[in-house]
Image (cartoon, helix red, strand yellow):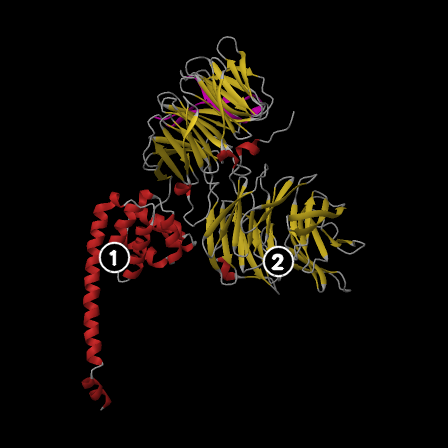
């Protein structure tokens, strides 16, 4: 049987890979890469199509190629438009990659081996051919670096020094340092040929290759062990990360820049990266904070935090409460539409994979990869029952019967379905039959049948009360990636890996229809993240990760409407945000789509209601966003704060281009508040910026003037008053200028 990796179809949202090149920050989110240009405040999203967690992101010096690698595979992307140029797969786990300075070569390290590839640009894209493979006697390779003329490669290992390889015909190989502490960063230079390495014990060593000089060593005097380090391109500075923060040291004496130490936090620094093309340095700390500093001017250019992302969600029957489970294991209860968090549960120690409300919404049940299912009382906010799988197998999906007494959980690796009694906590049965990961799990509300879909191309039906056995199965031609059972249990909808949707009758096992879903074939990595019956089972909603959802009529199995989330999830900095949808849920009437920091509710045919989840709306958060260069966020927070003086200050401080982009993708729900604040801002002395902003709002296609008549009426009166005042001032100024330029005044001034 083929091996399946859970992250292949669940994905991951943490920033497992970071890179900083040319003032652009690259971060990984699932199978996507986001690029954020700090100076212009613009974002792009590239879909890699990798089925593995992204480990490293590297941009070539020519800034044309973006290399994204996973555990054993990689993809070359066009750095401008994100187009896939080439893909490759290695025979081992990739530990380090590096482009040469000229982008003619690529070095790939895999455990103890190093492969050097020749890269050739052709009319059809990029070709790569293996030039040489080296197997080193040292342990795991952790660092790879090229010389500026592409003649040398130096590799650093975890515990046995480093090695220099010359790209000559005889491929010269030199062992440097011998056995030494772990190498945290390393550089090689050709003129003169020397290797500079920083070791974990704080020793900076310089080894000369061509010249008859003894190696030099400098102790940096770091108080604690070095966890990471990065030299800048000309070796004039090194950023050193430790368990207590980070230090910036300058050549030639490698002393600490004391002015930078005033900004250093006390958290442990996991990664630090020097931008090879600018004076920026990136630090990523253990508390999830990512900072980009200009080490030359000692200024903080950008700051953000890697938050736990909502991996699953569930909505109450009346749509008033939403529960989200995160990748870190925490769960939050949100009141809608206010977006206030009423409670947070932290009992799970791993990713929360499923959430289900019991009938009546008095309690909900959660499942996690930590191998537990927990039941929570919504009135007392108490975890009143904990169910544990045998051998602590992670749970991916759960289902609860209508009585709220039976819960079923699908496990991560064994592909079994365990059945528990919620009231007693007793494990009643294990259903065995699937040969691949289970992708959906339901209990029919009007019978004791359990439906489970799987990557083994089947949907199986089980009886759990009496016979406790498999009753039937629905066979598919390809892997079933998602499924949904109608509220009355009569219809079964399935989505397969080839982008098709099927509708079955559960009683007769008759296939009522099949349909190809174009939204699931927009690119690699696009998947169905939600399949829900709605409106008394008369409609079927399919939500894809490509920001598109389709609505189908179940009676005719025909498409009613296709809708795009771009106008809701559109990045207010002007970029694509295909990876921001993290989960979706439905209660049969409402559809809730959860993004990175907000939930968007779709109720019948009404306009979507957007709610920011748990955002800290205060003057401090506005200033923090401004200082971090997050102009769009600062504008939105100042509008939500509804403090006219703060909004006016932000409006006059933010450059005009970010304001235009913010208005272009502005959420319609805050448009009225922005117009009210602009009405107040018209009384400020700098009225030109306010009028320019009003013009952009009026030209925005998302603004419906019929909804804001009273506000626009007040603005019209304010503008008329300003026009009268300006006209009066202009007429007075014209009269004054005429007087100054009159012959009488000229004669007086000349005499």
Residue 278 x/y as whole percent: 55, 60
Whether residue 5 is situated above or below residue 511 in the rendered picture: below
Residue 650 x/y as whole percent: 34, 55
Which residue is depicted at the point 66% across and 49% down?
143
Q: Are marks 1 and 2 in contact (CB under 8 Å)?
A: no
Q: Magenta span covers which residues?
A: 375-401
The image quadrant that residue 490 belongs to is top left
**Which of the marked residues, 1 or 2, is nearer the chain's N terminus?**
2
Residue 745 x/y as whole percent: 20, 84
Q: Residue furthest right?
A: 170
Q: Which residue is at the front of the view, 531 or 213? A: 531
Q: Please indicate whether residue 96 sits to the left or right of residue 411 in the image.
A: right
Label 1: state its secondary structure: loop
Whether residue 203 is situated above or below residue 312 in the rendered picture: below
Q: Which residue is at the front of the view, 359 or 123? A: 123
Mark whose residue sits in front, 1 or 2: 1
Residue with the mark numbered 1: 682
Q: Please indicate whether residue 124 sits to the left or right of residue 383 in the image.
A: right
Q: Residue furthest top?
A: 466
Residue with the mark numbered 2: 220
């Amino acid at each position: 049987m083929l091996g399946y990796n859970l992250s292949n179809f669940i994905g991951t949202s943490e920033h497992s890979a970071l890179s900083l090149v040319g003032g652009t920050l690259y971060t990984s989110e699932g199978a996507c890469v986001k690029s954020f240009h700090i100076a212009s405040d613009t974002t792009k999203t590239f879909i890699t199509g990798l089925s593995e967690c992204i480990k490293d992101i590297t941009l070539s010096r020519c800034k044309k190629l973006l290399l994204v690698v996973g555990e054993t595979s990689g993809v070359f992307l066009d750095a401008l438009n994100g187009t896939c140029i080439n893909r490759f797969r290695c025979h081992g786990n990739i530990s380090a990659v590096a482009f040469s300075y000229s982008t003619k070569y690529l070095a790939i390290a895999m455990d103890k081996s190093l492969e050097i590839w020749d890269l050739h640009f052709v009319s059809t894209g990029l070709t790569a051919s293996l030039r040489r493979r080296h197997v080193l006697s040292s342990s795991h390779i952790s660092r790879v670096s090229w010389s500026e003329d592409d003649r040398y490669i130096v590799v650093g290992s975890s515990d046995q020094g480093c090695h220099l390889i010359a790209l000559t015909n005889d491929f010269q190989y030199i062992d440097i340092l011998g056995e030494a502490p772990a190498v945290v960063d390393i550089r090689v230079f050709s003129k003169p040929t020397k290797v500079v390495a920083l070791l974990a014990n704080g020793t900076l060593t310089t080894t000369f290759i061509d010249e008859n000089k003894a190696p030099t060593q400098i102790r940096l005097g770091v108080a604690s062990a070095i966890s990471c380090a990065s030299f800048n391109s000309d070796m004039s500075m090194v950023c050193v990360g430790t368990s207590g923060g980070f230090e910036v040291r300058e050549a030639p004496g490698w002393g600490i820049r004391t002015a930078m130490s005033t900004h250093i936090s006390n958290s442990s620094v996991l990664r630090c990266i020097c931008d090879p093309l600018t004076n920026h340095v990136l630090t990523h700390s253990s508390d999830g904070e990512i900072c980009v500093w200009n080490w030359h001017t000692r200024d903080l250019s950008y700051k953000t935090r890697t938050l736990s992302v909502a991996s699953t969600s569930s909505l109450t029957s009346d749509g008033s409460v939403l529960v989200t489970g995160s990748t870190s294991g925490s769960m939050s209860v949100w009141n809608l539409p206010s977006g206030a968090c009423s409670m947070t549960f932290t009992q799970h120690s791993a990713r929360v994979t499923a959430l289900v409300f019991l009938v009546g919404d008095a309690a909900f049940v959660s499942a996690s990869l930590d191998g537990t299912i927990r039941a929570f009382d919504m009135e007392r906010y108490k975890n009143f029952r904990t169910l544990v799988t045998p051998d602590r197998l992670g749970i991916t999906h759960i289902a609860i019967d209508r009585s709220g007494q039976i819960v079923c959980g699908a496990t991560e690796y064994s592909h079994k379905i365990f059945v528990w009694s919620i009231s007693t906590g007793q494990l009643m049965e294990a259903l065995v039959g699937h040969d691949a990961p289970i992708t959906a799990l339901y209990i029919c509300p009007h019978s004791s049948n359990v439906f489970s879909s799987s990557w083994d191309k089947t949907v199986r039906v089980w009886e759990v009360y009496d016979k406790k056995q498999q009753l039937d199965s629905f066979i598919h031609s390809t892997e079933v990636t998602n499924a949904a059972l109608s509220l009355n249990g009569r219809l079964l909808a399935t989505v397969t890996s080839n982008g098709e949707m099927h509708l079955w009758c559960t009683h007769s096992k008759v296939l009522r229809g099949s349909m190809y879903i174009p939204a699931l074939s927009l690119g690699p990595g696009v998947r169905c993240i939600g399949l829900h019956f709605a409106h008394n089972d008369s409609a079927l909603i399919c939500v894809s990760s490509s920001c598109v959802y389709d609505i189908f009529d179940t009676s005719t199995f025909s498409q009613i409407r296709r809708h795009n989330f771009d106008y809701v999830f559109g990045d207010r900095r002007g970029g694509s945000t295909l990876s921001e949808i993290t989960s979706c849920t439905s209660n049969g009437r409402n559809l809730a789509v959860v993004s990175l920091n907000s939930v968007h509710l779709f109720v019948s045919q009404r306009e979507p209601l957007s709610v920011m989840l748990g955002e800290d709306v205060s003057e401090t958060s506005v200033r923090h966003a401004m200082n971090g260069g997050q102009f769009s966020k600062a504008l939105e927070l100042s509008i939500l704060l509804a403090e006219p003086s703060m909004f006016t200050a932000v409006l006059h401080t933010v450059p005009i281009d970010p304001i235009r982009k913010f208005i272009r993708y502005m959420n319609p729900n805050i448009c009225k508040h922005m117009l009210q604040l602009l009405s107040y801002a018209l009384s400020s002395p700098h009225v030109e910026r306010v009028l320019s902003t009003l013009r952009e709002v009026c030209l925005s296609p998302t603004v419906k003037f019929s909804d804001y008549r009273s506000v626009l009426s007040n603005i019209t009166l304010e503008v008329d008053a300003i026009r009268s005042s300006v006209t009066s001032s202009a007429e007075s100024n014209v009269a004054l200028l005429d007087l100054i330029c009159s012959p009488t005044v000229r004669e007086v001034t000349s005499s």
